Image (spheres, rainbow, N blue to C red):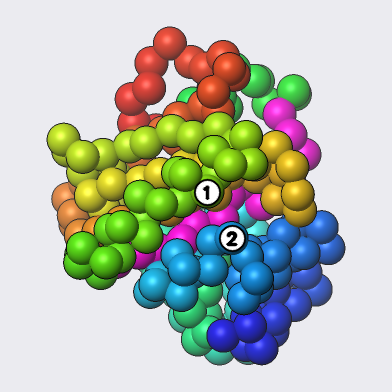
Amino acid sequence: MSAVVASCLETLQNNGLLNANEARGVDWLLAASSPFAAAVDAAETLHLHIKVEDTDALPVGAFLDAGARLDHRRGGYVKFCFPDGINAIFSHIRIAQEEALHDDGARRPRPYLDHVGVDLREESDAVFAVFEDVVRIGAGFGWGHAAQGGDSPVFCCHVSVARKHWLYPICGTLAGTPIEFAWGALTVHAEKAGCDLRPAPPGVACAPSSGCC
């Protein structure tokens, strides 16, 4: 997958949506030597969620030229599927608890890679074991962790999955960029929109409410 992934990353870089350091972080996660190689190998897709100023100002033509297709668009949120198994998601809405603490003047300059997602869709014991093991691997690096789901599905826009593990790297090429491991089939809810905000990293203050965006 790495050869075709490189062309997707190159498209994003050439259009100023992904910087060189962020691309190196994605390459590290996808490498055969990555500690998360088992999860990447078991994944149906990978996604890059990029925060932008305005989702209506994206270079859609460049994405289409690279073979991507528009998956869906909602206000402030749009998703493109590239033929190599990479889903590029762009948003200008709040998706994380800690974002509510900053007004527009104090927020991080955009665009930036908000998080990398590993989509484990197969609901088998083997894949679930791989999903659960990422927590142990992250703890070995001293990374923070937060879980979502279990008792109820985790929503993002108009879709949901059963569970998520969030890891918060504090070292390496993805330091400061959360990694999302999502387990379970992707369920579409045509009449629902909104998302369960990403939990703030351990030790980071967050908004009093953790409801949907």
Residue lying at the far right in this picture: please name it. Answer: 20
The residue at the point 26 percent across, 53 percent down is 161
The residue at the point 52 percent across, 17 percent down is 206
Instruction: Locate the N terminus and report the quarter of the image it occupies.
Output: bottom right
Element under label 2? loop
The residue at the point 45 percent across, 44 percent down is 135
Q: Which residue is mark 1?
A: 137
How many numbered circles does the render carry? 2
Asked whether the residues under the numbered discs 1 and 2 touch, taking CB atoms below 8 Å apart as contact, a structural biologist would say yes
Residue 186 visible, this orientation: no
- Magenta stretch, main secondary structure, is strand
The mark nearer the N terminus, 1 or 2, is 2
Residue situated in front as seen by the camera: 32 or 47 = 32
Query: Badge 2: few (under 14), some or many (20 or more) residues near its Cα, within 10 Å?
Result: some
Answer left or right for 15 relative to 206.
right
Magenta span: 107-121
The verdict on residue 116 being magenta is yes
Element under label 1? helix
Q: Which residue is mark 2?
A: 35
